[in-house]
Image: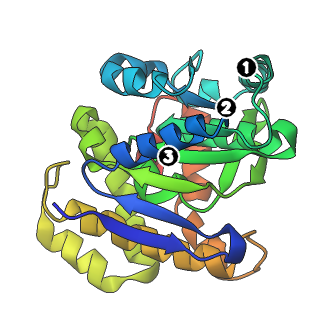
Amino acid sequence: MAVESVIVTLGERSYPIRIGAGVFAEALAVAQEKKSQGKKCVAVTSPAIAHARPDLIKSLEAYMPVVITMHDGEKAKAATECIRLWDFLAEQGVARDGCIFAVGGGVVGDLAGFVAASYLRGISCIQIPTTLLAMVDSSVGGKTAINLTAGKNLVGHFHQPQAVYADTSLLSTLPAREFAAGMAEVVKHGLIADQALFVELQKSGSLNWQSPRLPSFIKRCVEIKAGIVAEDEFEMRSEGGRALLNLGHTFGHAIEAVAGYGTYLHGEAV
């Protein structure tokens, strides 16, 4: 199956998004190069990924230490977790030429991205999304955030990654419910920007991680979001722009909060 590529065009901060089975190996090649250059890196992942994919952890540990978050889900996006990660980076001697590899779903991407944005006033971050939702949405565009008691994503930063590696083979261990929640974001992209995509999704029927069309659907969503981000990176437009990407999210975040985080998956709420 061919590997797809999309470039998020942001001048000197432009970066590639690689989509397809096996692109995790490309991320490991980058890790190997950074290690050979003496650049210290740290990988951040979740308990769920550490349990489901110990092979990923072992591969990463050849090049860098791996930190596992204290919790799965939104509880991980906490200030206490940030402090723990900042301290770990400092203890490891990670400098400004270092990098964080975010390996997980949207929560890990948000948390690790924010830690990268704030540590030493900003170090590189490479996103390796392991959920469909993260592949089509949260790993792209540079939004990073943690939660407060008052609400979700209230402290954050725009911090574009160095690259995104969306390895579709990593979806093999994703629960069906999580896959369906990710498809909600795919449908959203069709609704806001691409009628043809929406029609194709209707025709495709039930999909799974092995569906031949999945990489092309992911690529189209990424193209849509990349185009919007290139025009409105910091969500400054009062109409259109990145605000379009929030379709379903105002009520979605409210549903998550009222029901209690974890009752509904993010994609289900959206």
- Badge 1 local density, few (<14 within 10 Å), some, or many (20+)? some
**Front position in the image: 205 or 110:** 110
Residue on which the image places disc 2: 40
Read off the residue under disc 1. 92
CB under 8 Å between discs 1 and 2: yes
- For marks 1 and 2, the one nearer the N-term is 2
Towards the viewer: 254 or 49: 49
Q: Which tag, 1 or 3, sits closer to the chain's start?
A: 3
Amino acid of disc 2: Lys
The answer to which quarter of the image holds residue 207 is bottom left
Q: Residue 138: x percent and y percent?
A: 53, 53
For the point 28% across and 84% down, the residue is: 196
On screen, residue 215 above or below 267:
below
Q: Quadrant of the N terminus?
A: bottom left
Spot occupied by residue 199 in the image (x, y as percentages of width and height): 23, 79
Q: Is 163 displayed left or right of 52 in the figure?
A: right
Mark 2 or 3, nearer chain start: 3
* Label 1–label 3 contact, CB within 8 A: no
Task: Give the residue type that dot 1 points to.
Answer: Gln
Distance between the Cα atoms at labels 2 and 3?
12 Å
The residue shown at (75%, 30%) is 94
The three-letter code of the residue at mark 3 reads Val
Q: Which mark is residue 30?
A: 3
